Each structure stands twice: as structure tokens, then as C-alpha cells.
Image (spheres, grey):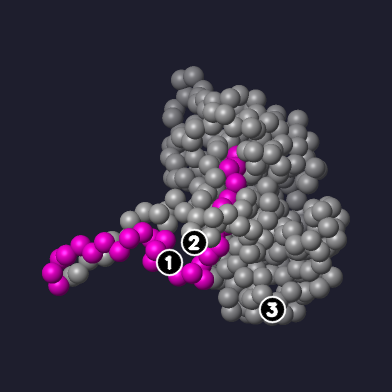
Amino acid sequence: MKKIIIGTIATLILTLATGTAMAAPKTIEMGTTAPTTKATANAAPQEETLRLTFGDPFADVSGLAVSREEATRTGMNALAKFYGISAEEIARNFTSEVYYNPPMDPLSFLNSPFVDFNEATGTRIDKGTVRDNTPDEFFPMDVYKGMWHGSLFPSNRAAMIGSAEPMIHSQDTFRFSVCAKTGELLGLQYFISVDPSRKTNQKYDNFPSPVAVFEYAHNMTSTHNEEYAKHAMKIAEEMNLLEGKVRRAAIIGGGWMPGKNSSFELHVFTVVECVNGEVVQLAFQGKDRKELTDVNFLSRKIDYAVNKDGSKTKPVHNFVGNPNSLYNFGWVNR
């Protein structure tokens, strides 16, 4: 699949856009309203490597329609519903970080000055704003809702730092996103293969390296697209994810994920669209298992779109990317 790696990079960029790199982060206990630091008396300090913290720890959360506590409950209940793990078990065994990301309006950046320089003379050239210099075909641009982002970690995470077991994102096992205006679920992730409490005898891909996974992904074909699309539509229907009848699906990208026993596994992203245009993104891990890891309600994250003149309009697409050019494969109909 010639463009699957490009899709992975694009997905990573979008993910990083909502994350803040933090070292030695504070944690938020279930049911509290502000970050608190967990520490054991007289214990030697544990040093954690730099990692991503999703959401903005410094954002102003006063006056939000949905509180941190309510968003946390919504996220835990969704994880319990989608993956069969009770909210009580999650609360008992995991510690949470829940941070807010304000609405993302591209015009706030596009209105910034656009300056060029004449290298020969060293003269500064004022060319108006970034918006003035952005081609018309880039509009309308989507504006994204304000969201609560939660990460849940095993409560004994400190004891696992430095573990030889390949853990992703510094041992955060669950993630969720909730709309700060309506309280609706916008996305969730469960990194099943790196959950230290999950014991499984399932077979893992065991690729020797991430490069080997990319090589496999690079050679995926339209047959794989049909296989994953049908699987994604089946899952979307079984879980009743979309408000309308499922219409079609397709692969939009992929990459690698760590598995058990130092293995590397294929991680494939798909989109499923229903008849009313709503789209959900589903990601599956393991080329044979196709274990659901991500549920991302892409169309629900978009609040509205803006034209070049700043006026509001409807979004052109319900998800990031061009639905008419899905990695040379196209849609697989139901």
C-alpha cells in the first residue's frame, strides 16, 4: 500500500497537535478537581522519561459546561461498555490524568503576520497575514470542539518504569476524549497488548522490527483493504457506533504497535461511514487478530468550518483527509 506510511505520519501529526510533552507529570485522582502529586513517604524518587501528556495542563477550565469529573466518568463508562472492563475495576486499578484542550480555530494562526525577507538586502517584507497568503482551495477549514482528554495509567506505574516489557506512551493503558460543551464521547483507546494486567494466550505478529511492519504495510493490497473494511463495518454495526445505517468503509493508514514478548505488530486505521455522512475511525492491532484499539468519532469533533473571510460554514468533509482518494483503494460498500 504505497501511501500507508504517509497516512501514519499524518495521523501522528494530528495526535501530536493535541499533546504536550511533559516530564515527571502530576496525576489526577478519580473524582478530584485539580492535579495532585502521588508520592510514597521516604521512597526514592522515580525518574520518568519524557512523554506526551494529552490536553493542556495549564488551560483555563472555569466556566466549562462539562466538568473534569463528569468527563472522567463518561470516559470510564465508555471503556467499560466497549471493552467489558467495569468502571469500578478501572477506578480501583488505574490513576488518571484529565486535561482540557480549548477549541482549535485555524484562523487564530492564519491571522498572524506573514513576513518575508530579501536575503540580498536583509530587508523585511510585510506581506499581510498568513490568511492573505493561503490559497483559496485550502478553505473552508474545520474548527474543532473544546475537549477533555484523559489518560489512565496502572496505579503501580512507577514500579514498571524501566521494565523490559515494551510499553507504549509510558504505560498509559486507556485514553478518552469528551466534548467539553455537550459531554458526548469523541474518542477512546485501549492499548490491549501492553496492558500489564491482561494475560492472554493469543498469537502475536512477532515482526522483528518496526521497519519490517512498515514493509508489510507498504505491500498491502486492495484485498487487504476489503478485508479490513468489512471487519470495520461489522464492528461498527455490532457496537451500534453510528446513528445511521453503515454505508461503506476503507483503510486510511497504518503503522506499528508494540505487542507482548517484545513483538512488533501491524496497526491499521480504517474509516466507516453511515448513510447520513457521519464517520467513525476504527483502528485494529494484529494482522490476524484485528483487535480493536481505537474508536474515534471524527465527525463529532468538528464544530463547524470557516471561510477565508472568517464567516462560518458547514464542513466539506467529515474527517481529515480526502474521502474520494483513500490511499488508491477507495471505499468498500456494505
**Residue 285, x across and y down, in percent:** 69, 60
Which of discs 2 and 3 lies nearer the camera? The answer is 2
Q: Identify the mark at residue 308; answer none if there is no mark.
A: 2
Residue corresponding to mark 3? 329
Say which amino acid is labelled 2. Lys
Side (left or right) of 129 relative to 259: left
Residue type pointed to by label 3: Phe
Report, in whole angstroms, how far the alpha carbon at label 2 lies from the one at label 1: 9 Å
The image position of residue 96, as x and y in percent, is: 60, 34
Q: Is residue 193 visible?
A: no
Instruction: Specify the label residue 206 is tagged with.
Output: none
For image coordinates 85% across by 61% down, the residue present is: 245
Spatial separation of the CA atoms under disc 2 and disc 3: 32 Å
Badge 2, how many Cα within 10 Å: few under 14, some, many 20+?
A: some
Q: Inspect the image, locate mark 1, and give the three-letter code of the amino acid beneath it.
A: Thr
Q: Is residue 325 above or below residue 141?
A: below
Q: What residue is disc 1 on?
A: 134
Of 331 and 269, the residue lying toward us = 331
Q: Is residue 8 above or below residue 148?
A: below
Assess whether mark 3 and mark 2 are in contact (beta carbons under 8 angstroms).
no
Q: Residue visible at 23% across and 64% down?
A: 125
